[in-house]
Image (tube, helix red, strand yellow):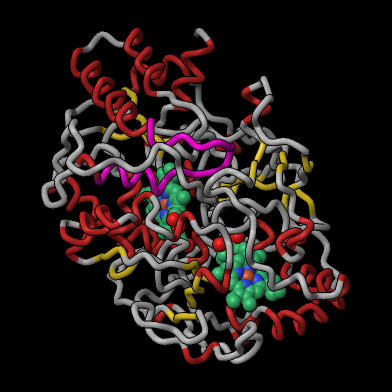
Amino acid sequence: MPRPLSITLACALPLACASPAATTGGGSEAAGSETGTPTTGAGASTTGTPTTGAPTTGTSTTGTSTTGKSTDGLRPIPADPQRDGDPDEGYRALVNNGYVSCGIPWTAYSQVFTDAPEALRLPGRDGKNATLPYDKTAFVGASGVELVSANCLQCHAGEIDGKLFVGLGNASGDFTVKVGGSAALADLLLDDPAEKAELQRFVARLNAVEPYTQTLTLGANPADNIAAVLFSHRDPDTMEWFDEPLLDLPPVVVTPVDVPPWWHMKKKHAMFYVGAGRGDHARTMMAASTLCTDDIDEARAIDEYFPDIRAYILTIEAPAYPFAIDAELAAAGAEVFAATCSGCHGTYGDSDTYPNLLVDLDVIGTDAALSTDASQFAGRYVDWFNDGFYGEVSRLEPQVGYVAPPLDGIWATAPYLHNGSVPTVAALLDSPSRPTYWTRSHESTDYDPANLGWQHQALDHGQAGEPSADVRKKIYDTTQPGYGNGGHTFGDALSASDRAAVIEYLKTL
Ligand code: HEC
Ligand code: HEC
């Protein structure tokens, strides 16, 4: 098979090139899926009031509602009621169902790809899905044609040290290239008119979305812009697709986002870095993957099983740190953490509490772009969402600021901050040491246990002047709009030994 076609098909399912495939390691692990059924609904999270470690102003207990004004820049996010679901059914649906609603016809796919290696397969998959890689799903579309598309795990599964974790954000997804035009080549492999029509529909959709979803760097994710483009072209009530957008499209320059891990959701009252995902989370979760769900009845059918998918997501536990931990140093770090960090990030271990705080931009000081009217959080899209099918039970309520996330499994979720601009926790906690330009191999084995994050090299230049596209797209340039690495300076005042102790403690979360 000609090489361009197989690359193209791998990339076009539906939007990203596959991350560097796992070739080694002990196979995949649905992190935490063996744990018990979580309690669903608002009761699932502990809403401890922060009492220690409040930053600067020290009055973190007094925040008002997230719509009101806060006195200290910390606003608690209240819980909203959620629909119950069955986690086992949810896992089954997540890895078998065709919620993307379009894709590449199986006839073409199967001429290019052989069965996935064992390490890339997942348990609990039916029929052809049993032999597909974890991030692809085969399903029969509304037209009766069997299709293959990417699923949620394209972005929401990742690898460390050769081991795949379901629920870990994919920190190496490639959204730097456009693939729609070349995906059309798969037409050469098809004879059946119904199959050709399905491929055309898929390629047309990629072409509509892609101009607005190209990022500069591997791992930077455009999901919020994808949602904005899909909203622009759809009637908010019927989900009907219009080739001519009904709303102004988002800016072509994508605001980059690092994919958050799913194991946060059991604690979080609001989805997304800016705390925008309010009301019913299950319905909001389906928005990013309904690339071709253009029919309200089909959307309602998908929505029926999304509470199950959410229930599954709530069972996922952060993976345990796999390397050695210095227990004594970690114990010292626990005290520093309690005094300096808990006020925003909560407490861990026996007295697990999480305050669900939205931190105002002037307190957190990280890159402002995502929290100021960017991508799907711009006013016209918020109205589209809230006034139509999604708004029946969910709502978008973006804020100027960022949620202080839970830190469970923080060792595994590098790079850090909402835009993935900081390669290690050590650099996050010592802001002058953060590299302005940096690069990494994107090999999952290049983990850095000492600094907690990815091994990387600081550079003295950005992408300009680098002739090789492969080298260029691995360069993270924090001077680009949306890619800034400033703010979150709460670790700067720590002594080197206290900082080392906190890092050791974070390994235990
Ligand atoms: C193209 C990549 C991509 C795909 C596909 C995708 N997501 Fe996401 N998802 C993201 C990104 C990026 C974010 C963070 C967005 C933000 O906070 O602004 C996110 C956020 C979330 C969150 C909120 C997490 C948190 O801590 O706030 C949930 C839950 C979620 N996605 C579930 C899903 C489900 C379920 C699917 C499949 C139906 C899916 N996603 C498909 C990229 C993706
Ligand atoms: C004033 C509240 C506040 C304090 C105090 C605070 N943080 Fe944060 N932290 C945040 C917010 C908000 C974010 C998210 C910022 C963003 O993504 O732009 C964050 C992000 C992080 C992240 C990155 C999370 C990720 O997944 O990318 C880590 C790690 C972290 N904090 C650790 C700490 C540690 C350790 C301390 C104590 C030394 C601390 N924080 C103190 C509010 C706080």
Q: Please name the residue shown 17% across and 64% down the image.
A: 392
Quadrant in which the C terminus is drawn = bottom right
Residues 108 and 433: in front is 433
Residues 147 and 224: in front is 224
Q: Position of residue 327 (x, y in %)?
A: 84, 75
Task: Indicate whether 206 appears above or below 61.
Answer: above
Magenta-colored span: 211-231
**Residue 104 visible:** yes
507 magenta-colored: no
Q: Position of residue 465 (x, y in %)?
A: 68, 25
Q: Please name the residue shown 51% across and 68% down the image.
A: 361
**Residue 128 visible:** no
Q: Position of residue 75 (x, y in %)?
A: 45, 80
Seen in the image, is 189 located left or right of residue 120? left
Q: Please name the residue shown 30% across and 63% down the image.
A: 396
Examine the image and state in which quarter residue 250 appears: top left
Task: Indicate whether 170 appears above or below 493.
Answer: above
Residues 423 and 461: in front is 461
Q: Please name the residue shown 27% across and 42% down the image.
A: 230
Number of numbered tags placed on the structure image: 0
Seen in the image, is 119 located left or right of residue 338? left
Q: Position of residue 223 (x, y in %)?
A: 42, 46
221 magenta-colored: yes
